[in-house]
């Protein structure tokens, strides 16, 4: 039976208790949000003593279901001031499941910088002052030296220690690259609790017991065959998420020059095709990298420099859009270097990229100044006034500099898709409990749904509602977003996925399980946000998206307020 591991940092004690009925059969985002909604005062200070930080593997973690190794991190967000979940791949989710841990709950504050090690014996507290203000790379190397290569590391960098609002949390892949649970400033919550890292070691542990092994085996086979046969799979394996650069640019929807334009003249130089050619031409790179055990999509990459030294893994669409097109930077080596520094300092590349573009809009840097932008990122860990501003994200930077165009909702920077063209995505930005977050429901056009017009001014709320519920369920199961996209085009795959869950939970689940689960998660999150003081006016895009034409197409976001208010009805 899975347990909840509760860690009292005030007293440096812990207890592992059987999962209460109210948390049973939940994992990932569904579990982090439920624990927050039931245990965290909505009006508490996100960096104060009453906030809790929760780590939860998904429902399917520890199984052989493909791409089921995402881990959710949850707390009240210092950035959005509401409930927040961020998730990442890596090795920790499967390891925690094999240790029989359904969630880790951090409570209170440690008296000094602390590392925690979780293994089959229990929990050990270690002092971590020697790693104070060290980057995530140094922390990982220290752990590998002291604890071996078979562990997973959950860590913050300098940004988390400084309690910056764009601080994220790194989770290591099986080959020790950091994957970021980046959004919402949750690294700052971990920093406020003075927890530098959590080390997870599942040596000699078995996976969760599955009673219906025959159903699980057959469902995994059918689900895997389905998602790997989808046309998206081959493109992701070759180009990764950067394959979206060309497509979104052609649609006139890529965030460009602080969301004042929808097309970037330098898009070809930061495209998936160009990056794949660079990786092929350089030593030690890899276009098809797995960030978790059991991945069948291999959509990550390892980007190296001309000499074959690893710069970053992986270089993703959102970073290319926010740090590239949005800043008019077309030098992919500069963008990769900025990405690497953010990964080491423990920062969200999206909110930092948004902040740099806002600073460029204010005249702090010339548009397209890649070296200057890289210097700004380095300044974050140096703690300069400018660095702290950028490290607190897009909204804070815009307010400090008096910039009119600040692309944020509930304090969080938009993703790389302009909502004046992709209006369903704009509805998700506006109404998601998580703030502007494409992973909560990105409404892209699809050959499987030829009647959907992403630029129509009406009919976007039902699309966003469906996607928000679907992806809240997917985040609860711990499935990678890119393995969850084929079932949207091939609905029969949803049945195989539900059968996987039925086998793991040993319960018969109905056809509408995913929608029911996602609706429950969204409702709980919105209830918390309402109690925290977030209301209808927080479910809106910034006014410039409604009043400024997006060049070159002249689009505006013209979905009505009534439609926005009906998304969660």
Image (cartoon, grey):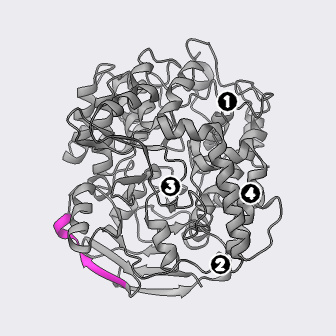
Crowd rating for badge 3 (residues with CA inside 10 Å; few <14, some 14–19, many 20+):
many
Kindly identify which numbered label has been placed on residue 423: 1
For mark 3, give the secondary structure: strand
Mark earlier in primary sequence (4, 3) = 3
Q: Earlier in the sequence, mark 4 or mark 1?
A: 1
Q: Horizontally, is 427 left or right of 256 in the view?
A: right
Question: What's drawn in magenta, residue-wise?
Answer: 123-131
Residue designated by label 3:
86
Instruction: Say whether residue 121 is magenta.
Output: no
At a point 70% along the width and 24% down the height, the residue shown is: 455
Q: Position of residue 296 (x, y in %)?
A: 55, 52
Secondary structure of the residue carrying tag 1 is: helix
- Residue receiving disc 4: 519
Q: Nearer the viewer, mark 1 or mark 2?
A: 2
- Where does residue 274 sit, x and y in percent of width and height? 40, 25
How far across and how far down the image is residue 225, in percent? 67, 51
Q: Earlier in the sequence, mark 2 or mark 4?
A: 2
Mark sitting on residue 469: none
Label 4 neighbour load within 10 Å: few <14, some 14-19, many 20+: many
**Sequence order check, earlier mark of 3 and 1:** 3
Query: Element type at marker 4?
Result: helix
Corner quadrant of residue 304: top left
Q: CA distance from mark 2 to mark 3?
A: 28 Å
Q: Residue at x 67, y 78 (%)?
A: 22
Q: Which residue is mark 2?
A: 210
**What x and y, as percent, mark residue 379?**
22, 40
């Amino acid at each position: 039976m899975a347990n909840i591991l509760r860690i009292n940092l005030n007293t440096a004690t812990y207890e592992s208790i059987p999962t209460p009925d109210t948390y049973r059969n939940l994992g990932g985002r569904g579990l982090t949000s439920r624990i927050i909604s039931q245990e965290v005062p909505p009006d508490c200070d996100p960096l104060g003593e009453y906030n809790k930080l929760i780590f939860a593997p998904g429902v399917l973690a520890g199984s052989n279901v493909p791409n089921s190794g995402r881990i959710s991190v949850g707390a009240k967000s210092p950035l959005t001031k509401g409930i927040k979940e961020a998730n990442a791949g890596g090795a920790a989710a499967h390891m925690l499941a094999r240790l029989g841990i359904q969630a880790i709950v951090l409570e209170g504050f440690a008296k000094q910088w602390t590392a925690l090690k979780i293994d089959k014996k229990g929990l050990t507290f270690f002092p971590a002052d020697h790693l104070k203000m060290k980057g995530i790379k140094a922390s990982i190397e220290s752990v590998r030296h002291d604890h071996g290569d078979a562990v997973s590391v959950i860590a913050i960098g300098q940004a988390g220690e400084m309690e910056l609002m764009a601080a994220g949390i790194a989770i290591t892949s099986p080959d020790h690259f950091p994957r970021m649970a980046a959004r919402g400033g949750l690294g700052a919550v971990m920093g406020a609790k003075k927890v530098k890292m959590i080390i997870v070691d599942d040596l000699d542990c078995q996976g969760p017991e599955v009673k219906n092994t025959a159903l699980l085996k057959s469902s995994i086979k059918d689900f895997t065959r389905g998602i790997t046969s989808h046309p998206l799979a081959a493109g992701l394996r070759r180009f990764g998420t950067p394959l979206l650069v060309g497509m979104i640019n052609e649609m006139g929807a890529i965030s460009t020059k602080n969301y004042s334009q929808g097309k970037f003249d330098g898009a070809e130089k930061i495209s998936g095709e160009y990056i794949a050619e660079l990786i092929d031409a350089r030593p030690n790179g890899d276009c098809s990298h797995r960030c978790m055990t059991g991945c069948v999509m291999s959509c990550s990459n390892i980007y190296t420099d001309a000499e074959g030294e690893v710069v970053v893994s992986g270089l993703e669409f959102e970073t290319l859009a926010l740090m590239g097109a949005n800043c008019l930077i077309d030098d992919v080596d500069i963008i990769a270097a900025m990405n690497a520094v953010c990964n080491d300092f423990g920062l969200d590349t999206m909110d930092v990229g948004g902040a740099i573009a806002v600073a460029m809009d204010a005249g702090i840097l010339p548009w397209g100044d890649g070296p200057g932008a890289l210097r700004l990122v380095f300044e974050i860990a140096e703690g300069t006034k400018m660095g702290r501003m950028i490290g607190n994200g897009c909204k804070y930077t815009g307010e400090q500099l008096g910039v009119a165009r600040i692309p944020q909702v509930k304090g969080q920077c938009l993703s790389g898709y302009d909502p004046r063209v992709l209006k369903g995505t704009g509805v998700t930005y506006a109404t998601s409990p998580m703030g502007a977050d494409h992973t909560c429901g990105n409404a892209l056009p699809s050959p499987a749904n030829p009647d959907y017009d992403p630029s129509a001014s009406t009919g976007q709320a039902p699309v966003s509602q469906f996607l928000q519920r679907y992806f809240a369920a997917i985040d609860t199961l711990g499935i990678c977003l890119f393995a969850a996209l084929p079932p949207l085009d091939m609905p029969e795959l949803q049945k195989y996925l539900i059968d996987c869950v039925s086998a793991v939970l040993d319960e018969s689940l109905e056809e509408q399980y995913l929608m029911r689960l996602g609706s429950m998660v969204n409702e709980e999150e919105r209830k918390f946000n309402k109690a925290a003081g977030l209301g209808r006016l927080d479910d809106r895009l910034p006014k410039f998206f409604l009043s400024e034409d997006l060049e070159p197409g002249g689009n505006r976001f013209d979905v009505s307020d009534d439609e926005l208010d009906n998304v969660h009805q």
